[in-house]
């Protein structure tokens, strides 16, 4: 083990080439979901005969994605501790291969929903692995920056894919444009993984060995005491889900914040159309949310390395909820764009830092599993949130009720995080050495 680890070291600079390869991978992951989120909903009526205003049908499409992606996040973390990070990444890209072909040949909306199930598998395996791999090779004091850069690259990829596929669809037709973009992205990702991506599991094992050998005077994270040395999957699952109140507080916040993204995906366009905005104007309002969220994470992740995770996470939940509520308070393109930007800023504060908080208090031996379980709950929020939106809109008869449902959920969830969470940064709130 010592020979294998002798030439490994942690840190972004020490592993810069591999770090950049992993950033490129997550950008390609963003491309893959971006191509499905932008053009495909626009196609639903003209190409696949989905009746106008069938919100429950579009909601079901997001529900399917959320439940599949959430489950695969859970599987990905555990599997990567057994077979390695690189193999799981390759499995994720293999799952994506049929997606562009299914969209191209799709005779009905059912094929699109099936392609979205494969997208959930792809996103669960690949996005989890790019994040876990970067955490393996970087230092504890770089975690916020690492996850911020990971999510920044992914969401910039998502935004760019929306723009590129819109142009390709206009030039070549929607199906041909998506086929060209999708196959190019997925084949490039597989090639780059095979040629240049390294398996980072040895770095995680080195960190675990260093942790075990560290003297009691060294600052150590507040790892949970009520977990065995080699925990079972169920033991880690129960710890992250409810047995440790810090993990539980973070997990519920992750689940509820996905209500916002489900709202933006399904109901922002409907709401803005009803108020007379054109399709490009709707695209800009939704785009501002994504650009502010993606771009700000570059800074908000690093911010949490300095001031801690807890404050950005709680404030992020409340600011995000305020942005959603603001959409209903005034009218006009400028106001809606401003509200979308506030929502994006709130997401940027909480999104990388909830993950960083999970990583802070997870032992290297089971960190992959803990991140996977947190991401299971978080992305289940797509499914639960979309169901909540659909039911709220259905029974109230208005889209506005869905906005209030999400805003109130965010305020309450932020309150639970504030009450039951704590600072997890090992420098700011270390485990006190036993005397």
Image: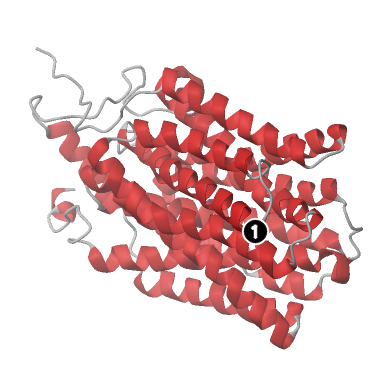
Residue depicted at x 52% and y 36%: 254
Q: Is residue 388 above or below residue 303?
A: above
118 or 424: which is nearer to us?
Answer: 424
Choose top left, top right, bottom left or bottom right for residue 16: bottom left
Q: Is residue 39 left or right of residue 190?
A: right
The quarter of the picture where the C terminus appears is: top left
203 or 246: which is nearer to us?
Answer: 246
On the image, the x and y values in percent for residue 121 come to 61, 54
Q: Is residue 401 left or right of residue 209?
A: right
On the image, the x and y values in percent for residue 424 come to 30, 30
Q: How is the image coloured?
A: secondary structure
Choose top left, top right, bottom left or bottom right for residue 256: top right
Q: Which residue is mark 1?
A: 333
Q: Is residue 269 left or right of residue 16?
A: right
On the image, the x and y values in percent for residue 236 come to 44, 28
Residue 162 visible in this rendered orientation of the protein: yes
Residue depicted at x 73% and y 56%: 269
């Amino acid at each position: 083990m010592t020979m294998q680890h002798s030439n490994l070291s942690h840190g972004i600079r020490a592993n810069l080439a591999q770090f950049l390869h992993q950033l490129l991978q997550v950008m390609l992951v963003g491309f893959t979901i971006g191509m499905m989120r932008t053009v495909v909903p626009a196609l639903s009526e003209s190409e696949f005969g989905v009746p106008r205003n069938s919100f429950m049908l579009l909601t079901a499409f997001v529900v399917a994605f959320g439940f599949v992606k959430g489950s695969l996040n859970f599987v990905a973390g555990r599997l990567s501790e057994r077979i390695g990070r690189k193999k799981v990444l390759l499995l994720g890209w293999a799952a994506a291969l049929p997606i562009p072909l299914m969209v191209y040949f799709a005779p009905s909306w059912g094929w699109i929903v099936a392609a979205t199930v494969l997208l959930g598998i792809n996103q669960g395996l690949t996005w989890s692995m790019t994040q876990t791999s970067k955490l393996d090779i970087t230092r504890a004091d770089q975690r916020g920056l690492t996850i911020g850069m990971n999510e920044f690259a992914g969401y910039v990829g998502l935004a760019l894919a929306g723009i590129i596929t819109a142009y390709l669809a206009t030039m070549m037709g929607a199906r041909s444009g998506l086929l060209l973009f999708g196959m190019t992205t997925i084949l490039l990702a597989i090639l780059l993984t095979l040629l240049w991506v390294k398996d980072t599991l040895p770095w995680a094992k080195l960190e675990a060995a260093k942790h075990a050998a560290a003297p009691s005077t060294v600052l150590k994270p507040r790892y949970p005491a009520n977990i065995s040395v080699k925990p079972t999957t169920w033991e880690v699952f129960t710890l992250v889900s409810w047995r440790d109140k810090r993990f539980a507080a973070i997990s519920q916040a992750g689940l509820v914040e996905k209500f916002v993204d489900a709202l933006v995906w399904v109901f922002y366009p409907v709401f803005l159309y009803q108020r007379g905005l054109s399709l490009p104007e709707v695209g800009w309002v939704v785009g501002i949310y994504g650009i502010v969220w993606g771009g700000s994470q570059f800074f908000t992740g690093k911010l949490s390395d300095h001031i801690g995770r807890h404050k950005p996470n709680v404030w992020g939940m409340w600011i995000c909820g305020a942005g959603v509520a603001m959409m209903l308070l005034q009218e006009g393109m400028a106001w809606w764009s401003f509200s979308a930007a506030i929502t994006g800023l709130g997401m940027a504060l909480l999104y990388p830092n909830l993950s960083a908080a999970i990583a802070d208090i997870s032992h290297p031996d089971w960190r992959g599993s803990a991140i996977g379980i947190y991401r299971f709950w978080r992305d289940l929020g797509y499914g639960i949130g979309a169901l909540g939106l659909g039911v709220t809109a259905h029974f109230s008869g208005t889209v506005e009720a869905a906005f209030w449902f999400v805003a109130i959920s965010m305020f309450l969830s932020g309150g639970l995080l504030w009450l039951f969470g704590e600072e997890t940064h090992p420098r700011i709130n270390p485990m006190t050495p036993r005397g």
